[in-house]
Amino acid sequence: MTLLAQVAPTAGGTAEVVVFWVFAVIALGSAIAVISLRNVVHGAVMLVLNFLSIGGLFLTLESAFLSVIQVLVYGGAIMVLFLFVIMLLGVDRDDLLQADLRTRVLAIAGGALLAGAVLFAFVGPYTSEASVCGPDAPAPGPGEVACAGLAEAYDEDDGAGARFLGRSLFTTYTYPFELAALLLTVATIGAVILARRRDLEPEDEDLADLDAAAADDLDGDDLDGASGAAAERHVAGDGPGTTERGG
Amino acid sequence: MLAEYLPILLLFLVASAFAVGSVAVSSLVGPRQPNPTKLSAYESGNEPLADVPGTRFSVKFYMVAMLFLIFDIEAVFLYPWALVFRELGWFGLGQMALFVGILGVAFIYEIGRGGLEWD
């Protein structure tokens, strides 16, 4: 395990290696179970196990903050989204799992390509001797990466890496940080547009301005239940094109 | 150090042992006198609704989950930001204001489009 030795040189004790192996085996096994189980809900539970064990791997690297975030965001929020998508599509829909030969070949090729690209771009530079942290590390040659960042990370005294993470996130990586917000916004707006084809009430639409007086009357009268029907009548009365907004 | 987490590991071990042990002991020594009511999914409650194959949930749950994700991630980013807030000064404040502002657009849009209305 060269990579573990490279990442945690000061804490490369026996306990760390044992914990790393336990979590690594659980992570790999659950990942294989995710793609091989026929029942998608069981697959989702295995995905939770995978996220938890990756959180454990972060803990092995003494990054308690990332570990907690992994459990909170991936094991919590992302998994809720996954489960809702499974429920939206229907749990017992076996026909969704059918794939013809062409799809399978394309999927395997795409997955291999992605895995190869990730290995080449992110893991490759760290497999050389120069990336091993320590006083006797040789100078990095072309295409190799020196041990960097970890010394600073270990110098941080909050013990969880959160301060270090915040400092680099809000100075060096400002642009990706704001892009993440934009990405989330786009995802949310897309989900709203896809999910809500028909508007509930026209009060915040421009067709409400056409007869605002009538809308005011209706809103004042029916506070519960009937306002939806009133909105229906409004939409129907305004002709085509208004019923299917954002579809 | 990793040794600080030893109590948490012990807690996990004890919890797992308790869960496995309870099931094992009750299956070993518990009496078995099944009847249809006992074997139903909720012994004294409603029958599960989703027993028809292909039952699908409403997309409205997804809207709620999406909002949950937005605020979850926002809170996650607020924590390291708060730790280095004094060092960053006004730059950090503006940065976080922009971040919350962009996410606020998504939030206001979803509320405005009735993403949380349950018609």
Image: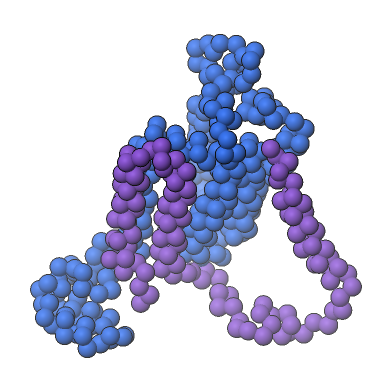
Chain colours: A blue, B purple
Please say if A79 is above or below A110.
below
* Residue located at (32% from left, 41% from top): B90
Q: In which quarter of the image is the N terminus of chain B?
A: top right
* Residue located at (68% from left, 27% from top): A10
**Residue A168 picture location, percent across and down:** 44, 34
* Residue located at (25% from left, 74% from top): A201
Specify whether residue A79 is in view.
no
Please say if A17 is above or below B79.
above
Q: Can you tell which quarter of the image residue B68 is in?
A: bottom left
Relative placement, left or right, of B115 versus A14 is left
* Residue located at (44% from left, 70% from top): B58
Relative placement, left or right, of B42 versus A184 is right
Q: Nearer the viewer, residue B57 or A61?
A: A61
Q: Which of B2 and A235 is in front in this view?
A: B2
Q: Can you tell which quarter of the image residue B46 is in?
A: bottom right
Q: Quadrant of the C terminus of chain B?
A: bottom left
Relative placement, left or right, of A19 versus A162 is right
**Residue A114 picture location, percent across and down:** 50, 34
Find the residue positioned furthest to the front.
B86
